[in-house]
Image (cartoon, helix red, strand yellow):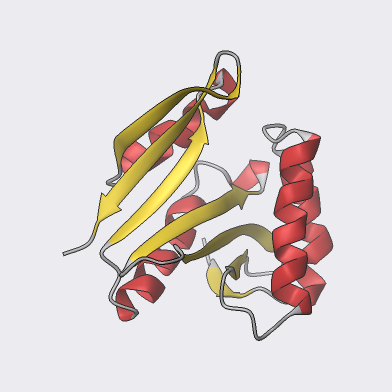
Amino acid sequence: MDIKVRKMLGEDREAIRSILLRTEVFNQDEIDCAMELIDIYLNNPSQKDYLLASAINGNNEVVGYVCYGKAPLTHGAYDLYWIAVEPEYQREGVGRILLNYVESEITKLSARMLLAETSSRAVYEKTRRFYIKNGFSEEARVKDFYSTGDDKVIYKKIFP
């Protein structure tokens, strides 16, 4: 599979919205939040809070994306805000390619750690396994954070 990662372009926006909908994981509030961060990135090129990249297949189609950024007021801590892959490309290594891209980029910036947070809902089980499989460990869990019975699970990956 020929997957390339490049900085997100404005023309990627609707393809990413479609991916977020078709994964059938994210609720409407989550999709709205993801799109808000995409719009901040696309409409304000001088901002540094959100960095976004798209995974592109051999036909130049967007098959995934990632959003990450430096955690404010930290020295070398970064947040992985969003990672989503086209359903038919899931389990094909695209998520790992996007994560490797992020790790390569933040390592150039002297990253010490990368944090990822997610929900404890059953629909996020594959996401939680993805983080563990890719070298993250569960760092914290905030009970009933998103709603009653829906914990916030925070994963951490340390860089040497």
| Of 84 and 97, the residue lying toward us | 84
- Residue lying farthest to the left in this orientation: 160
Question: Is residue 45 at least partly visible in the picture?
Answer: yes
Rendered image quadrant of residue 12: bottom right
In this picture, is 150 found above or below 126? above
In this picture, is 83 found above or below 149? below
Apparent side of residue 69 relative to residue 130 in the rendered image (left or right): right
- Residue lying farthest to the front in this orientation: 73
| Of 73 and 153, the residue lying toward us | 73
| Of 43 and 132, the residue lying toward us | 43
Apparent side of residue 124 relative to residue 70 in the rendered image (left or right): right
- Whole-percent x, y for residue 42 in the image: 75, 75
At x 56%, y 51%, the residue is: 83
Question: Is residue 60 at least partly visible in the picture?
Answer: no
- Whole-percent x, y for residue 33 in the image: 73, 49
- Whole-percent x, y for residue 87 in the image: 66, 41
| Of 55 and 50, the residue lying toward us | 50
- Residue lying farthest to the bottom in this orientation: 46
Apparent side of residue 10 relative to residue 136 in the rendered image (left or right): right
At x 65%, y 86%, the residue is: 46
Q: Quadrant of the C terminus?
A: bottom left
